[in-house]
Amino acid sequence: MVQLVVDSGCDLPDEFLRKYGVPVLPHRVSVGKDTFGDQRNPAQMSHFYSRSLVDRSRVVNSGPAGEPEIEEVISKLIRQGHKDIVIQTINAANSPTYANAVAVAKRLSGDTVEIHTVDSHTLFSGQGLLALYTLSLIQKGLTGAQVKSRTEEFGRKIAGYAAIQDVYYLRERGRQKNEKSVSWLKAFMARSLDLHPIISMTYQGSAVADTVKTFDGSTHRLFQIAEEKMAANALLMPAVVVSIAGPLEQLENIPGFKSFLETAAKHKVKVYRSVMSLSGGINLGPGTVALAIAAK
């Protein structure tokens, strides 16, 4: 059977990943002078968010999963007898993790071991949704080569959305990466008028899907996007991944979430809740709420 490997940008609950035996490649996270690997450990993530380590007053950065870390994980799987492995990573346009995985796959692949690398072309909750789809293919008995082909095609149908709480934070992170989609003037106007963008993330890149007054209004609109797709029977997979850059229990109080759950139950759509990866929280800002769907 094919073995799936994801990186820590993949927003799925730790207990789910452990249940299905999915190893996690750790992105590097640094807070000041301290550096550690993000392995989606619940205690670590809870500590990170509850201590407000993601905010504008701290020097916080994230980095890719390096070749040595990836090679350690894959080599262990090979020693355990796995011969058909699929490594699925965060969007290659946003991180060198995919390139590192490709380099490791070339070194470790051989006559008896096949390693397939998949650029998810998405981020965070979108990665989580693609991993769910991948596991469904593996359970059907597809080979690694077949899984790679099908997931790359399915990934083009995934749309991720994120309601941004702190536009100033997003602008500062973008400035550090030389991304100028949120200018100082836009951030100032958004703060003055209490406007909050909803960022869309698809195979073709990122854009502002909508701008809504108040953060409560933006989360309402975020969940409404998914509800509209459900009502139109437009989902290609009866699942939605929702993540939050903060403690998971806060989701219950996010405006629009309860109505969204009722709509999902009505249309028999399963909702997977997850704490947002530390990389996601660092880049999108504290309090960000995201979801991903695959739709026609």
Image: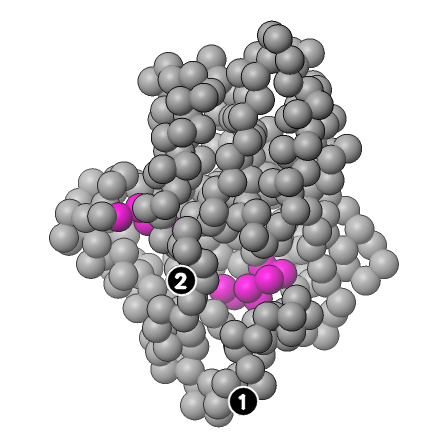
Q: Nearer the viewer, residue 251 or 286?
A: 286
Up the image or down, 224 lies above or below 153; here it is below
**What residue sits right under mark 2 in the picture?**
200
Label whose residue precedes the other's in the sequence (1 or 2): 1
Up the image or down, 259 lies above or below 154; here it is below
Horizontal side, residue 103 vs residue 164: left or right: right
Q: Nearer the viewer, residue 101 or 238?
A: 101
Residue 14 seen from this side: no
| Secondary structure beneath label 1 | helix
Q: Quadrant of residue 104?
A: top right
**Residue at (32% x, 46% y) in the render:** 157
Q: Magenta region: which residues?
A: 281-295
Look at the numbered discs 1 and 2 and tell me whether their residues touch, using CB distance below 8 Å: no
The label shown at residue 61 is none
Q: Which residue is situated farthest in the right direction here?
A: 33
The label shown at residue 185 is 1
User: Does residue 211 show up magenta in the picture?
Assistant: no
